[in-house]
């Protein structure tokens, strides 16, 4: 049962700051995703928590215990690597047993616990296989069993699913979630895949240039992004820039948008998700919704949904509609787009 | 890659290549069992020369020196070289690329020149000649081979393996013993063989660094031939060949060089 606190951590490589004054808390038993583009510092943060690197300044605490000076082998962390890093010269059993033999547990207990761990990842009977005799998905399960079998205080996953193909990835997401709940271990995983972060995690932290830009439950991050970066990195968003005018946002063409909350004088930008935008029928009344008029430039058919690109003020706006079989707008048509004030989210630029 | 079945002509070609390699050696081995010392045919089988060899103190002590120096060279060069490869693999530091490049020229520099340089240098700094000087010379010659062979093996090494072991609680020495070393083993063994061969085969440098009366087998064979050839040389050579082949075939059976251990 472990709460992990990262307090004011800075990590410098040469003259480059990989992390700058970063603070975040990982709650006990939580499933936490660190999301960010490459170079954002998410992997560095994971390696600092694991103990492969040490912070230049700041503190890392497990249940209030100082960890920042301890090397990995003394921290009791389970880690699963992107490459899985299974020991090629050892069988599945010996791979999983490694953390237990290091702890000098009696042989009988090692056998029981390895069997339990293999059952948990549904690989019972694979004990004698070598890593090169396993499929990608099986290797990943072995890596996971190996990381949790010695009951570490925290489980760290580095891009756990990125080496799998899409079908297998979806299956493993469900598995990973189930196992994490069963074991109840505090879990932190790093990913650049926003969908994976939203699907798996209870909380998501978005990193950019070595700083934590926003942090919270997936729904909150998606619905109420604080910055244009979060809005566009986590899903898609249409950004509108204007000036605040009596609590509303005046766009350069004169359109007034009503945002989710009264705009402060400093507010200039709002974000609107493509699936929250409706294309109005010719005589339809928009009600209290924000309306802008544009010209459809492209319609992309994607099975369950339709994606429209709409030219407005020399820009291309994205609109996503569920495919309900009705005839939608065609390219070249002039249309009115409507979106509710609560979906017009003020963000920092 | 698809293996095509080899036609008759191809097989004949390969047999010729192997004959080209083995013909002189086979003749030497056969003649070591010939009673006549003048390569006369037909062969009259006898162990006469092996008997004579048993009484040849000079050759036997030279053989003992050779094996001793080769074993020590193998041990020292393999350990030092593997440590150097690991350092090149693990750390990024100024001058790393230059240092790696500088490993290659000693292999190409003629041994005669290296030997002369060593002889002069060893005299100048007071090491002089003798078995200890030979050992130093052989280790220096073997090191580049060891580093290159073990580095080739390390190219396929995933450093995450060590991190994984550490995260599971293994202290550094255990990581090395249970993860790094088993992975390196085939490369280490190939490197050790190279080191042994470089030392055991070494003539030029041993010749330069030996003192009269204490030398290695190649030097002793050369001296003996200069005084006049006797089939005892065939006999000792045949023993050496048999020993080397057994060693190499034995190792090749257990390891695929440069590839995965089977």
Image (spheres, rainbow, N blue to C red):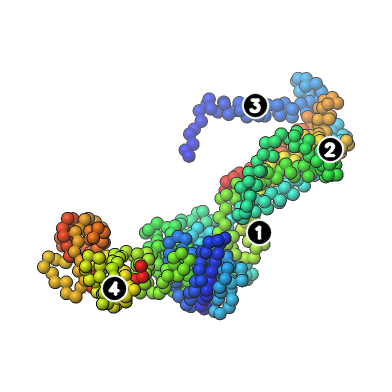
Q: In this view, does B137 lie above or below B37?
A: below
Q: Distance between the residues labelled 1 and 2?
A: 38 Å
Residue at 57% over, 71% down = A57
Task: Find residue A255 and report its horizontal and vertical position in percent.
Answer: 21, 68
Disc 1: CA contacts within 10 A as few (<14), some (14-19) or many (>=20): few
Which of the labelled discs sits on residue B88, or is there none? none
- On the image, the x and y values in percent for residue A79 come to 52, 66
Q: Residue B210 carries which label?
A: 2
Q: What is the spatial separation of the Cα atoms under label 1 and label 4, in whole angstroms?
A: 66 Å
In this view, which residue lies farthest toward the left? A283
Q: How far apart are marks 3 and 1 (CA)?
A: 44 Å
Q: Name the residue under label 4.
A: A244
Left or right relative to A64: residue B52: right
The verdict on a common chain for dots 3 and 1 is yes
- The mark closer to the camera, 1 or 4, is 4
Report in which chain the residue with disc 2 lies.
Answer: B
* Mark 3 vs mark 1: in front: 1
Name the residue located 48 percent from the left edge and 71 percent from the top edge: A187
> Mark 4 falls on what kind of element?
strand
User: Do the CB atoms of the residues marked 1 and 4 lie less than 8 Å apart?
Assistant: no
* Of the two numbered discs 1 and 2 in the rendering, the one whose residue sits closer to the viewer: 2
Per the image, the residue denoted by label 3 is: B20
Q: Nearer the viewer, residue B254 or B207?
A: B207
Q: What secondary structure is marked by label 3?
A: helix
- Residue B53: image location, x then y, percent: 84, 33
Mark 1 residue element: helix
């Amino acid at each position: 049962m472990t709460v992990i606190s990262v307090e004011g951590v800075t990590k410098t490589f040469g003259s480059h700051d990989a992390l700058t004054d970063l603070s975040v808390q990982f709650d006990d038993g939580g499933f936490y995703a660190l999301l960010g583009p490459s170079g954002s510092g998410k992997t560095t943060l994971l390696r600092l928590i694991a103990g492969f690197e040490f912070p230049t300044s700041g503190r890392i605490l497990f249940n209030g215990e100082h960890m920042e000076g301890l090397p990995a082998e003394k921290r009791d962390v389970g880690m699963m690597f992107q490459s899985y890093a299974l020991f090629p010269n050892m069988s599945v059993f010996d791979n999983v047993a490694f953390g237990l033999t290091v702890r000098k547990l009696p042989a009988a207990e090692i056998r029981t616990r390895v069997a339990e761990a293999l059952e948990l990842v549904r690989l019972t009977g694979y004990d004698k296989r070598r890593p090169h005799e396993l499929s990608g998905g099986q290797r990943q399960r072995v890596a996971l069993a190996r990381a949790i079998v010695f009951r570490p205080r925290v489980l760290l996953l580095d891009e756990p699913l990125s080496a799998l193909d899409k079908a297998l990835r979806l299956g493993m997401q469900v598995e990973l979630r189930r196992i994490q709940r069963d074991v109840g271990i505090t879990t932190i995983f790093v990913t650049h895949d926003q969908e994976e972060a939203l699907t798996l995690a209870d909380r998501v932290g978005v990193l950019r240039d070595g700083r934590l830009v926003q942090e919270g439950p997936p729904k909150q991050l998606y619905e109420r992004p604080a910055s244009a970066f979060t809005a566009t990195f986590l899903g898609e968003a249409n950004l509108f820039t204007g000036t605040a005018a009596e609590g509303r946002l005046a766009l350069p063409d004169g359109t007034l948008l009503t945002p989710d909350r009264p705009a402060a004088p400093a507010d200039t930008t709002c974000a609107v998700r493509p699936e929250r935008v409706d294309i109005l029928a010719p005589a339809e009344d928009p009600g209290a919704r924000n309306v802008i008029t544009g010209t459809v430039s492209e319609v992309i058919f994607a099975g369950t949904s339709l994606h429209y690109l709409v030219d407005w003020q020399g820009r291309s706006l994205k609109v996503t509609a569920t495919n309900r079989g009705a005839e939608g707008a065609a390219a070249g048509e002039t249309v009115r787009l409507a979106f509710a004030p609560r979906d017009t989210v003020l963000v920092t630029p | 890659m698809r293996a095509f079945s080899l036609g008759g002509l191809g097989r004949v070609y390969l047999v010729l290549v192997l004959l080209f390699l083995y013909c002189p050696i086979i003749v030497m081995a056969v003649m070591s069992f010939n009673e006549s010392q003048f390569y006369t045919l037909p062969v009259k089988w006898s162990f006469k020369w092996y008997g004579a060899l048993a009484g040849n103190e000079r050759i036997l002590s030279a053989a003992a020196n050779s094996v001793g120096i080769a074993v020590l060279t193998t041990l020292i060069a393999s350990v030092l070289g593997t440590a150097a490869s690991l350092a090149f693999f693990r750390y990024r530091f100024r001058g790393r690329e230059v240092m790696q490049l500088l490993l290659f020229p000693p292999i190409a520099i003629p041994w005669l020149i290296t030997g002369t340089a060593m002889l002069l240098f060893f005299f100048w700094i007071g090491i002089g000649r003798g078995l200890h000087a030979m050992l130093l010379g052989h280790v220096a010659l073997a090191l580049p081979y060891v580093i290159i062979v073990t580095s080739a093996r390390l190219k396929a090494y995933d450093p995450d393996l060590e991190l994984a072991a550490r995260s599971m609680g293994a202290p550094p020495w255990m990581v090395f013993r249970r993860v790094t070393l088993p992975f390196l083993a085939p490369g280490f063994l190939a490197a050790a063989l190279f080191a042994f061969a470089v030392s055991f085969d070494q003539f030029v440098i041993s010749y330069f660094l030996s003192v009269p009366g204490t030398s290695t087998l190649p030097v002793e064979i050369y001296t003996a031939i200069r005084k006049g050839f006797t089939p005892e040389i065939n006999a000792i050579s045949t023993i050496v060949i048999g020993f080397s082949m057994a060693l190499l075939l034995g190792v090749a059976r257990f390891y695929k060089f440069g590839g995965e251990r089977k």
